[in-house]
Amino acid sequence: MCYSEEQIIEGCINNKRKAQKTLYSYYYRRMLGICLRYCSSKDEAEDVMLDGFMNIFSKTKSYNKRGSFEGWMKRVMINTAIDNFRKNKKHYYHSDIDDFENELVIEANLLESFSAKEILNTVQQLSEGYRIVFNLFAIEGYSHQEIADMLGISINTSKTQLFKARKLLQKKLIEMNE
């Protein structure tokens, strides 16, 4: 039996297991993809994704029908991944972006020589701080101010971590291409 998105949402609001299972079955791959960008392993990403779905199920009543439901779920999943990062991270790197002179830019033709999976695996090799800031800025489109507020770091730290992440990604990709 097929359910409309509205029926699934209503079922989740009413804690109907069938609706929750349908929602999970339909979206788990997309949500796992988001979590993989923020976590250092597939096991950690799966744990974060499960926590994210629990948050989605418990907060479905707060979905105000402005924007897509999937977009709202992605936001919940990203916030869950960030909460996981905060909970497990003991220290942040604090650096000033002014310490760095020239930002390296990954050439488009270099990126074209890799599959999405290879790039994702390379991003996952970054330290947690670098990976989180890189994903929030480069993939999700958050500003450095928003990232700083979310992670409890300075704007300069966000900028520095993005700079270092890009530089390290470029280095790793160049090494893989040789």
Image (cartoon, helix red, strand yellow):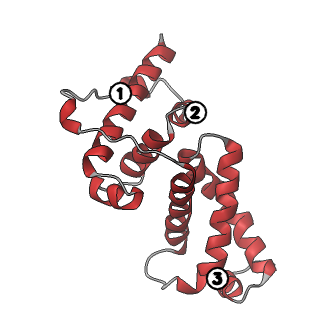
Point 35% across, 32% down: residue: 164
Q: CA distance from mark 2 to mark 3?
A: 34 Å
Please tell me the numbered disc located at residue 20: none
Disc 2 designates what residue? 121
- Which is more foreground, mark 2 or mark 3? 2
Q: Give the quadrant of residue 170.
A: top left
Secondary structure under tag 1 reads helix
Point 49% across, 74% down: residue: 68
Instruction: Tell me: 165 left or right of 17.
Output: left
Mark 1: amino acid: Lys
Disc 3 designates what residue? 9
- Which is more foreground, mark 1 or mark 2? 1
Mark 3: amino acid: Ile
Instruction: Tell me: 19 left or right of 165.
Output: right
159 above or below 141?
Answer: above
Could you classify mark 1 by the number of other residues whose Cα lies within 10 Å: few (under 14), some (14-19), or many (20 or more)?
Answer: some
Mark 2: amino acid: Asn
Residue 2 place in picture, x, y as percent:
76, 77
State which tag comes first along the sequence, 1 or 3.
3
Residue 169 place in picture, x, y as percent:
43, 28
Point 33% across, 55% down: residue: 148
Secondary structure under tag 3 reads helix
Q: Nearer the viewer, residue 99 or 31?
A: 99
Can residue 144 be seen by looking at this rendering? yes
Secondary structure under tag 2 reads helix
Disc 1 designates what residue? 167
Q: Nearer the viewer, residue 36 or 113?
A: 36
Answer whether labels 2 and 3 touch (C-beta < 8 Å).
no
Q: CA distance from mark 1 to mark 3?
A: 42 Å
